[in-house]
Amino acid sequence: YKENRRILQEGMKKLGFEEFLGPEHDGYIITSYKYPKDKNFNFKTFYSKLNEKGLVIYPGKVLNADCFRIGTIGNLFPEDFHELLAAIEEVCKEMNIMLPIT
């Protein structure tokens, strides 16, 4: 699971996504990411497009914070996270979200 988390963390950082929690709360079970500030980002569209590719992410469960979560445990392997990262990049391009996100 730690390797899944490492791949996710590095890939999302390269794409410009910012983690919701600071490194002092680092874990390898689930990671929350802030919504990009890009005007073209819409979580429902982002979620739906990933879901159409057979990939599932989760809405954030934080009050007054726009974020989503990605789990890194279960029947998941490093290649699954490489696939997810490629799909996230593709979906962002389809949504005209500038990468890396700033």
Image (tube, rainbow, N blue to C red):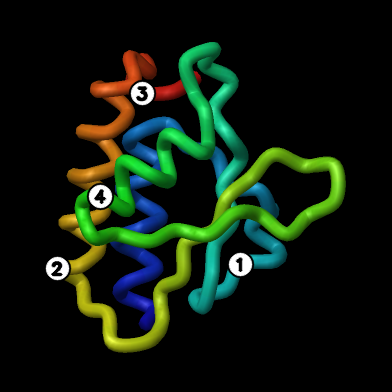
Spatial CA span between label 2 and label 1: 22 Å
Q: Does the residue at mark 4 contact the one at mark 2 (Cβ under 8 Å)? A: no
- Which tag is nearer the camera, tag 2 or tag 1? 2
Element at badge 1?
loop
Q: Residues within 10 Å of mark 4 (few under 14, many from 20)?
A: few
Q: Does the residue at mark 4 contact the one at mark 1 (Cβ under 8 Å)? A: no
Counting from the top left corner in percent of width and height, residue 84 is at: 25, 54
Counting from the top left corner in percent of width and height, residue 73 is at: 41, 82
Q: Residue furthest bottom?
A: 75
Spatial CA span between label 4 and label 3: 23 Å
Residue named by callout 4: 52
Q: Residues within 10 Å of mark 2 (few under 14, many from 20)?
A: few
Q: Against 2, is 80 above or below?
A: above
Residue closer to the observer: 29 or 94: 94
Q: Is residue 97 left or right of residue 66?
A: left
Q: Mark 4 or 2 closer to N-term?
A: 4
Spatial CA span between label 3 and label 1: 22 Å
- Which tag is nearer the camera, tag 4 or tag 3? 4
Residue named by callout 3: 100
Q: Mark 2 or 1 closer to N-term?
A: 1
Element at badge 4?
helix
